[in-house]
Each structure stands twice: as structure tokens, then as C-alpha cells.
Image (spheres, rainbow, N blue to C red):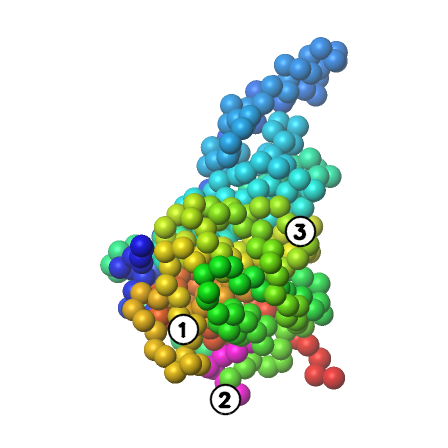
């Protein structure tokens, strides 16, 4: 089954349109009993005060849209529960006090779900956004800037320590797809590959490195329905069948962090119902409706390093724009904003 949407076809110039953005910012009042809790003098009153709010169902996934943006653990202990954001994107709230950011890249846009856990405050902050590419040219369309001049970037709430070497493993899955585009995409982001300079790389490089640590039989911690699962301390990128994911999902990246520091990131590329092109190195050209592995992986690696999406059609030439078209290999090379974002996060590596 091929679920490539018409909006996702063709080169970037024609197919990358302005994106409609919806952001969740709920201000639902906390459970009615909460205010009473502070004044409850007797232990007997606590039971009534801690009756969970109606959205805090005892089982199954909880919908971020139905929940307040800040959830007190005393009202609803989300740890270990699955929270569902926009466009079907979901994450398991870590049970060990870490936070998680989930990103999905779709043929028709992208989604992000952030679950920031602050155990000291006893509070979880939820942020869910979804971007869909409208059919045709939207009214707010602005011509894309030249990627070599467009300095726009967004930062996620966490990053790796400056100077870190991030070891990652490759998960081949069972679809028989090659590793080459995955490793190319990862190195393209770390090595700031670009078409903007004669040397085909920005300089100086950001002060963060990657090291391939071998193949693994353990899949990325992304479930069959593209939900971020529990993290296991190993960074894994690779091919995964996600039969329960929404049909437009191409890839999912889950990043776990403690305070402002990233501790793990996994990327799963969807093998079910999606066609992939490993790249031009074998002399082939991209079959219609296929997705460039290196381009998608470069974008996902940006999330791994702490870059968020740059919204708006004027930024559509950047790697961190929230859409990718079939056979589009442009995201495999960084624009100015993608590079500036890496430098803002990590500073410049000294050339010594
Ligand atoms: Zn993305």
C-alpha cells in the first residue's frame, strides 16, 4: 500500500507549501478537589481531595488535547502512561523522572509532543503541536528564502553536553533496506554538509561528534504505532515496521532528557507501506513516490541534536522545515539556519 499524498510529491519548490500550525495550549482548571487539599486538616478529607480529574482515565492512552498543559502529579500521575498528542503522535511518559520529546515526520507535515517532567515541582508540562501541509497554495504563502541566507532555527528544550561524542547503533530491521542512507544522514548533520560553501561543509563544525557503535538487534524504543516507549540508554537509528502508525508517518524520533540535558535519542524509519530511495551513490535515480533516506535521516538527526522545526513557507528550504517531499534530497544538505542552530546549541569546535 502506498500512502504518499499528492501534496508530498515533486521537488521542494512546488510541493513545500506554507504550513498551518495548531498549538495546544489548554488552560483547563485543575481538579476541583485540588484547592481543598491545602486546607484539609484531617486525613479523612484527603481522599476526596485527591479524586482524579475526569480526563485522568484509569487505563488507556490519555489525550493531551483534553488535559491541562501543566499536570500536577498529585492530580494525575502520568508516569508510565501513554499520552497522545496531535496527528496520532504519542509517547510513554517515562517512569524514572526523565522527560521525552517525540517528533514524527509525515508525508503531509510533522508533529511534536513534548512531555517535560519536573519531579521536584511534582509537575508535568505537555506541549503538542501539529503541522499539516494544505492542498494548493495557501493564502499566507511566502516565497521560500535561499537556504544559504535563511538563518532561522528553533531549539528544543534539551541538548547533549558540549563536546560530547554521541555513540549510536544501527538497527537493520527485517525489510532488507540498506544502512548507507542512514549513516549518510547522521554524518550530514554532524558534519554540517551544505551546498552553500565551496568545501560542501560549514565551518567551524559544532562542538559535538558522533560515533557509529555497531549494529544492534534491539529496535529503537518506538512502538509499532510510532509511540515513544521507555528508553534504555542506547541510541538507535534504523528501519522499523510500525503497522499501527498513521499512514502518512515516515519517521519518528524520540529524545529523552533530564533537565536541559539529552540522555538518549532513537529514530525509526517506517518500512511498512513506504518506499525509500537509498540515494544516488549506486547510480540510480529516485523512483517516483520514494523518500530519500539520507534527507529524512538528516532532518531526524537535527531533532536528536536539539533542533526543532522552523515553521512557515519562507523557511521551507531549510533541513528543519517540517515537511519533506518524495524524492527530495535537499534536506540532506544544511541551510544557514540549520548550521546556526547547531552552533547556538554547541558552540564551535576548536580546530586544535
Ligand atoms: Zn521533524
Nearest to viewer (mark 1 / mark 3): 3
Quadrant of residue 316 within the rendered picture:
bottom left
Q: Is residue 59 above or below residue 153?
A: above
Residue where numbered disc 1 is placed = 329
Which image quadrant for residue 160?
Answer: bottom right
The quadrant in which residue 330 appears is bottom left
State which mark lies toward you, 3 or 2: 3
- Image position, residue 64 (x, y; %): 49, 38
Number of callouts in the render? 3
> According to the image, label 3 marks what residue?
232
In three-dimensional space, the C-alpha distance between marks 3 and 2, rounded to whole angstroms, equals: 41 Å
**Residue at figure coordinates x 62%, y 80% from the top left:** 204
Q: Nearer the viewer, residue 79 or 75?
A: 79
Q: Secondary structure at mark 2?
A: loop
**Dot 3: few (<14), some (14–19), or many (≥20) neighbours within 10 Å?**
some
In this rendering, the answer to whether 14 lies above or below 242 is: below
Magenta stretch, residue numbers: 192-199
Whether residue 84 is visible here, answered yes or no, is yes
Task: Tell me, for residue 198, which label it has, or none.
Answer: 2
Q: Earlier in the sequence, mark 1 or mark 3?
A: 3
Amino acid at each position: 500500500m502506498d500512502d504518499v499524498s499528492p501534496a508530498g510529491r515533486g521537488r521542494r519548490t512546488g510541493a513545500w507549501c506554507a504550513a498551518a500550525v495548531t498549538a495546544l495550549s489548554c488552560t483547563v482548571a485543575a481538579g476541583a478537589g485540588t484547592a481543598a487539599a491545602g486546607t484539609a486538616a484531617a486525613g479523612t478529607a484527603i481522599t476526596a481531595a485527591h479524586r482524579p480529574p475526569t480526563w485522568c482515565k484509569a487505563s488507556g492512552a490519555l489525550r493531551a488535547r483534553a488535559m491541562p498543559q501543566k499536570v500536577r502529579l498529585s492530580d494525575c500521575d502520568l508516569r508510565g502512561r501513554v499520552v497522545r498528542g496531535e496527528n496520532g503522535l504519542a509517547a510513554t511518559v517515562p517512569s524514572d523522572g526523565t522527560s521525552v520529546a517525540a517528533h514524527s515526520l509525515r508525508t503531509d507535515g510533522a508533529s511534536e509532543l513534548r512531555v517535560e517532567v519536573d519531579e521536584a515541582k511534582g509537575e508535568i508540562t505537555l506541549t503538542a503541536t501539529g503541522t499539516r501541509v494544505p492542498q494548493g497554495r495557501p493564502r499566507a504563502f511566502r516565497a521560500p528564502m535561499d537556504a544559504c541566507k535563511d538563518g532561522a532555527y528553533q531549539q528544543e528544550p534539551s541538548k547533549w553536553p558540549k563536546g560530547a561524542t554521541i555513540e549510536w547503533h544501527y538497527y537493520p530491521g527485517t525489510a532488507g533496506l540498506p544502512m548507507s542512507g542512514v549513516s549518510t544522514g547522521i554524518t550530514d548533520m554532524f558534519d554540517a554538509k551544505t551546498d552553500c560553501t565551496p568545501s560542501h561543509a560549514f565551518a567551524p563544525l559544532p562542538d559535538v561528534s558522533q560515533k557509529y557503535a555497531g549494529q544492534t538487534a534491539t529496535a529503537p524504543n518506538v512502538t509499532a504505532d510510532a509511540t515513544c516507549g521507555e528508553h534504555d540508554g542506547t541510541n538507535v537509528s534504523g528501519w522499523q515496521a510500525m503497522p499501527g502508525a498513521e499512514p502518512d508517518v515516515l519517521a519518528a524520533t524520540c529524545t529523552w532528557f533530564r533537565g536541559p540535558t539529552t540522555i538518549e535519542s532513537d529514530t525509526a524509519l517506517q518500512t511498512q507501506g513506504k518506499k525509500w530511495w537509498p540515494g544516488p551513490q549506486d547510480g540510480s535515480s529516485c523512483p517516483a513516490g520514494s523518500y530519500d533516506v539520507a534527507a529524512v535521516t538528516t532532518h531526524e538527526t537535527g531533532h536528536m541534536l536539539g533542533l526543532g522545526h522552523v515553521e512557515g513557507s519562507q523557511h521551507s528550504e531549510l533541513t528543519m522545515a517540517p515537511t519533506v517531499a518524495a524524492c527530495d534530497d535537499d534536506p540532506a544538505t544544511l541551510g544557514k539556519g540549520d548550521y546556526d542552530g547547531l552552533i547556538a546549541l554547541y558552540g564551535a569546535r576548536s580546530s586544535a
